[in-house]
Image (spheres, helix red, strand yellow):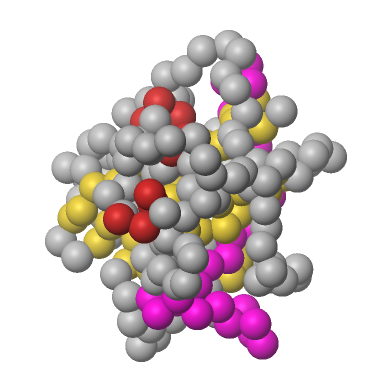
Amino acid sequence: MLATGGEGPMVDTPTRRAVLGAGVFAAGSLLTIDASVAEVSLAPTPACHDGEAPTLRQTEGPYFKPSSPERIELIEAGMAGQPIELAGFVLTRACKPIAGALLDFWQADDQGRYDNSGFRLRGHQFSDAEGRYRLRSIVPGAYVGRTRHIHVKVQPRGGRVLTTQLYFPGEALNRTDGLFRRELLMQTAKNEGWLAGRFDFVVA
């Protein structure tokens, strides 16, 4: 389902989907993000309710490449950009964690450029036994017509693929990007040069 614009002014604040629960791993388990970023770090299970709406689907765009390397660390030596650690859960509509779900991420660099010849800033991983995932990357740059965003495909074992995009709160270009959706805003918090991000995926 391709999201389009035309719904009037958008309030650029994270929705309930992005703030389910109180944290992606127990205190102290984020590698470099201080445990004081409590609103973004995860409790053992998120606080949600049976019948949650699935995460919105969006276009994959022209820059997806299959067969990305399996890794949670997309930052490479000498890479420019603000580091971000994004984490969350993969859940069913009944709010049950999904273990072993595939998450395939790709994004632009801090100048808004995609690596189309290799796999820079591309990688896949699998949710753990409690449905959690974690990604370490950089904040992507904006480019013509697009605000900052991270692409992702999420697929439970044997299930349907969810293709969507995640957005950053507080970006001026959110208001002019026709694909932007408030429901896909991450919750973020700054911590000594790092950005901690939180988003939970709900798959049908």
Between 190 and 175, the residue placed more toward the observer is: 175
Where residue 20 appears, x then y in whole percent? 41, 27
SS assignment for the magenta stretch, majority: loop
Can residue 109 be found in the magenta stretch?
yes
Where residue 98 appears, x then y in whole percent? 64, 33
- Residue 13, placed above or below residue 148: above
Q: In the rendered view, does 144 fall on the left or right side of 117?
A: left
Whether residue 74 appears in this view of the structure is no
Whether residue 97 appears in this view of the structure is yes
Where residue 94 appears, x then y in whole percent? 63, 16
- Residue 161, placed above or below residue 116: above
Residue drawn at (58%, 70%) of the image: 122
The span picked out in magenta is 93-119
Residue drawn at (32%, 40%) of the image: 12
**In the rendered picture of this protein, how many numbered marks are placed on residues?**
0
Between 134 and 130, the residue placed more toward the observer is: 134
Residue drawn at (53%, 44%) of the image: 5
